[in-house]
Image (cartoon, rainbow, N blue to C red):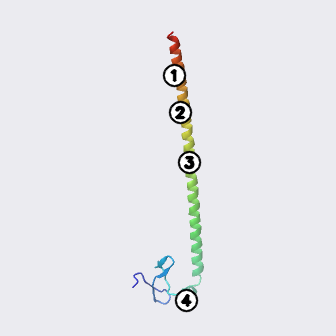
Amino acid sequence: MYRDMNNCLECGRLVAPSSGLRGADTDNLFCCRKCLRAYYDSQPGLWEQELENKREMEEAYEHHLMEEEERQRQIDIENDRKRIKQQEEEQQKLIIKIILYVIFFIFIICFLRSCH
């Protein structure tokens, strides 16, 4: 009937994937809460170890998020610097064009005066 069936880790019965809110859960390892409690009771410290692992995973994820934010901040700073540098270059080009046009205009004025 079910393709993905597991045996309960405690009693060995088949565990069918139960249909939850998000669909079938094929990762079930226990057939009932009683077996789940019995498994954790038989292995002292396992629950605390899993909580510690979960906490470590959350810390690693937070650290990853912080690194990603820092990387994005560095990229934003670099892009701002490039944009400012590009604006400065455009301003310099504009100033050079204005100077060349003024020189050309002065040259034309001088040339026209000399024609008379």
Instruction: Kindly check if marks 1 and 2 are in contact, taking CB atoms under 8 A apart as contact.
Output: no
Q: Residues within 10 Å of mark 3 (few under 14, many from 20)?
A: few
What residue lies at 57% left-to-right and 42% top-to-bottom?
84
Measured along the vertical axis of the image, is residue 93 above or below residue 74?
A: above
- Report how far apart the C-alphas of labels 3 and 4 lie in the structure: 58 Å
| First along the sequence among labels 4 and 1 | 4
| First along the sequence among labels 1 and 2 | 2
Q: Secondary structure at mark 4?
A: helix
- Report how far apart the C-alphas of labels 1 and 3 lie in the structure: 39 Å
Instruction: Kindly check if marks 2 and 3 are in contact, taking CB atoms under 8 A apart as contact.
Output: no
Which label is found at residue 104? 1
The kind of residue on which mark 3 rests is: Glu
The kind of residue on which mark 1 rests is: Phe
Which label is found at residue 93? 2
| First along the sequence among labels 3 and 4 | 4
- Report how far apart the C-alphas of labels 2 and 3 lie in the structure: 22 Å
Quarter where residue 103 is shown: top right
Q: Where does the image place residue 43, in percent across and percent down from the top left?
A: 56, 85
The kind of residue on which mark 4 rests is: Lys
Q: Where does the image place residue 20, in percent across and percent down from the top left?
A: 50, 80
**Which residue, given by chain and number where applicable, does mark 3 sit on?**
78
